[in-house]
Amino acid sequence: MEFDEQYFNHIIAGVKRELLKSNKKHDPVFNTPHEGWAVLKEELEEVWEEIKKDDIIEIQKESYQLAAMAVKLLYSLPFILEKDKSGVYDDTEN
């Protein structure tokens, strides 16, 4: 099976939609990495519950939420670092 960039872009658009939906209810950034981890852990547990039920539709729904929160954590890190006056992580080397 080859990588399907069109389907990948569809998934990324879904993650973006889920993140924007979440941002309407909650702060758009996490206050600490620990807060981000707690939310990711909760979302991962929800994915696991749906996997145990073998409910593909719910697995997909929860996976979009998990991915959105992972993006939110990445998005939050520069703001967290700015608050700490520690600088910003340079991801251009990765």
Image (cartoon, helix red, strand yellow):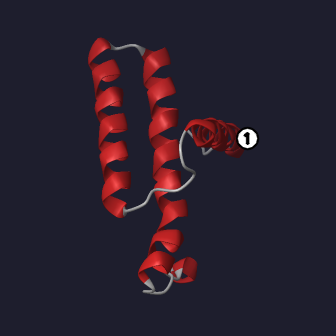
Seen at 34% across and 19% down, the residue is: 50
Q: Is residue 23 above or below residue 60?
A: below
Residue underneath mark 1? 6
Reply above or below: 82 against 1: below
Question: Quadrant location of the N terminus?
Answer: top right
On the image, the x and y values in percent for residue 41 come to 30, 43
Q: 25 or 66: which is nearer to us?
A: 25
SS of the residue under disc 1: helix
All told, the count of numbered labels is 1
Instruction: Determine the image quadrant of residue 30.
Output: bottom left
Q: Residue at x 30, y 47 (%)?
A: 38
In this orientation, which residue lies closer to the viewer: 77 or 54? Answer: 77
Q: What residue sits 57% from the left and 36% below the top?
A: 25
Depth check, front residue: 31 or 88: 31
Residue furthest right as drawn: 6
Residue in front for this viewpoint, 62 or 51: 62
Three-letter code, disc 1: Gln
Taking the spot 54% from the left edge, 49% from the top edge, the residue there is: 27
Residue 64 x, y percent position in the rendering: 52, 35
